[in-house]
Image (tube, grey):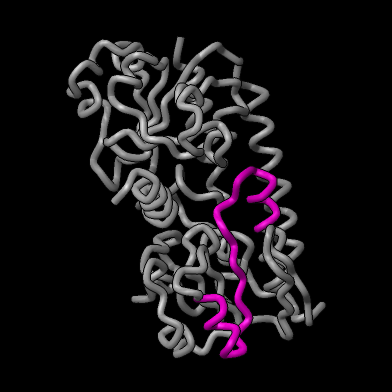
Amino acid sequence: MNRTMSALFVVAALALTGCATHSEPATGTNTPAAGFPVTVTPTGGKAVTIATRPTHIVSLSPASTEDLFAIGAGQQVTAVDKLSDFPATAPKSDLDAYKPNVEAIAARKPDLVIVYSDTNNLVAGLEQLKLPVLLLKAATSLDDAYGQLALLGKATGHSAEADKLVGDMKSQIADVVAKTAKKPLSYFHELSADGYTVTSKTFVGQVYGLFGLRNVADAAGGAGDYPQLSAEQVVAADPNLIFLADTTCCQQSAATVAARPGWGTLKAVRNGNVVTLDDSVASRWGPRVVDLVKAVAAAVQKAS
């Protein structure tokens, strides 16, 4: 597997995996079936018309699953892929987002399908069966994440709930950022122990940018938004903060980082600023991005 394909695999895997330990959002109650049919247009995609308020939604995107339950559409979701682990009440199935099967999805008799990627021409296959399908790719910014919540609200008949959630998220994030003093700190965000990381252009990179942090991966110009840094590059950069987004998947910790050859001398290690993140919170762009913002804020406040 070449370097580019390895990076894409890591990013896709982390966007779909991770174990959550937070409390579950309330599913809410269904709102009246008003305003249908509706037409929604995902970012960079084509318009999709939904004839009636969906009651048999299938989600093959863990981030979208979280969105649906957070806006009160959980009762309309009848099946989610096997990696949708939050909330715990989500109707997990054997559907595979990595290897989607059109027939298996159709057998669930959905009236709306939500997918994360168009693997194996999945969208065209579902459209041939006259099944409404929304392709919601990984958000590239906070505004994109808010937009997906609003879109799902409109698509499911929960626009008011989605708008309120977006407003609450914006308010909470703004409050956390305002209360966190800016410091001239550098950081390294670890996707996997073999050095895959993110640049400031990514969704998670923009979260760090809210606090004015400098990303050491940005210096690896020309390597894409998800470059692989060598251990020597990280050691040479000597970041003030190291954030681990591979704690659940790969059992990485402050101790394992300190044990790596040469890493024990890093400022982040010596000062106790190796931060363990919940993998799924750090890789999804749903409502729990607020938790990620709070985790980064706490790390910045502690660091010197």
Relative to the observer, which residue lies in front, 40 or 236? 236
In the rendered image, residue 132 lying in the magenta stretch gets the answer yes
Give the magenta-colored segment's residue range: 122-148
Q: Is residue 160 left or right of residue 261?
A: right
The residue at 56%/41% (across/down) is 203
Q: Is residue 95 left or right of residue 204?
A: left
**Can you tell which quarter of the image residue 270 is in?**
top left
**Can you tell which quarter of the image residue 7 is in?**
top left
Let me know if residue 250 appears in the view: yes
In the rendered image, residue 247 lying in the magenta stretch gets the answer no
Q: Is residue 1 left or right of residue 113?
A: left
Relative to the observer, which residue lies in front, 7 or 149? 7
169 versus 134 height, above or below: above
**Can you tell which quarter of the image residue 267 is in?**
top left
26 versus 173 height, above or below: below
27 versus 10 height, above or below: below
Horizontal and vertical percent position of residue 249: 28, 48
The residue at 51%/68% (across/down) is 118
